[in-house]
Amino acid sequence: KNILLVLQESTFLPEALGKDLEGSMDGFFKQGELAGPLKVHVFGGFTHLSDFAIQTGLPHSTLTGDRMYTSKTLPGRLDHTLAKTLKNCGYETTVIHPISRSYFNARNWYKSVGFDQVISSEDLGHEPTRFWSTPDKVFFEAARGIAEQVDQATGKPQFIYVLTIAQHGPHDTKGDPKEEYLRRLKISAEAYMDLMQTLVPKSSGARPWIAAWFGDHRPH
């Protein structure tokens, strides 16, 4: 099966803001067979450490030395990662992330942990210095396009890892920052649900997808 994994930075249940789930957000948070709380190892920032944990299965707190900057200190030193394991099983591996290819050594980090293709915000024509202004839909559309290209070119099973950042601060608005956060969350939820609809195989012979997403730290 193909695998889609999505890390949506700064995404959490709106109930924490005293808001009920409604509309697309209800389906977004409750869709799938398995849903529930997930422990992350950061607070208020450092999503690259959540990224490290999902790729290695290790929290950064188990390390010594300069453990806050794993994407800079560990490339070339990790033999067992999620992407490498899937690659050894015959998967084509792609990561699509919303920041500059040089930010936190992103391109070198992802190549070192086993991704065949690394797509950054610059590659999608977006300004990496205002990364929070890029909606999730941009990265989901890129994932859809990559899925079609790889399937036609190689026929291999695919592992696509997408990171998004639309819920990240600042939430600079003339109104309530909480309402601005919820506005972005609703847009992201709709984009994800749309992706789920379009990734469903259109023929019985098509390779099915397993999809999962998880949220990260709350914004400042």
Image (cartoon, rainbow, N blue to C red):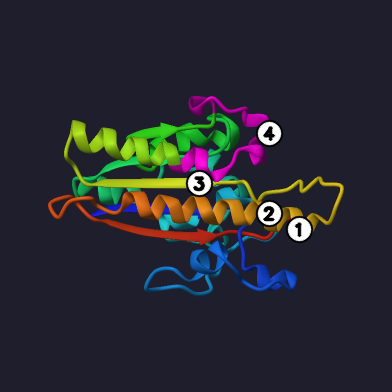
Whether the residues at callouts 3 and 4 have beta carbons within 8 Å, the answer is no
Label 1 or label 4, whichever lies nearer to me, is 1
Label 2 or label 3, whichever lies nearer to me, is 2
Q: Position of residue 117 (x, y in %)?
A: 36, 33
Q: Does residue 80 lie above or below 132 as drawn?
A: below
Label 4 or label 2, whichever lies nearer to me, is 2
Q: Does residue 216 lie above or below 118 as drawn?
A: below
Q: Earlier in the sequence, mark 1 or mark 4?
A: 4
Q: Is residue 95 left or right of residue 41?
A: left
Whether the residues at callouts 1 and 3 have beta carbons within 8 Å, the answer is no
User: Between marks 4 and 2, how big is the CA–CA gap?
Assistant: 18 Å
Q: Which residue is mark 3?
A: 163
Query: The residue tagged with tag 3: helix, strand or loop?
Result: strand
Read off the magenta span: 122-140
- How busy is the neighbourhood of tag 4: few (under 14 within 10 Å), some, or many (20 plus)? few
Q: Determine which of the numbered discs, if any, sits on residue 183 in the image.
A: 2
Count of residue discs: 4
Q: Quadrant of the N terminus?
A: bottom left
- How busy is the neighbourhood of tag 1: few (under 14 within 10 Å), some, or many (20 plus)? some
Whether the residues at callouts 1 and 4 have beta carbons within 8 Å, the answer is no
Give the main secondary structure, helix, strand or loop, of the magenta stretch: helix
User: Between marks 1 and 4, how big is the CA–CA gap?
Assistant: 20 Å
Q: Earlier in the sequence, mark 4 or mark 2?
A: 4
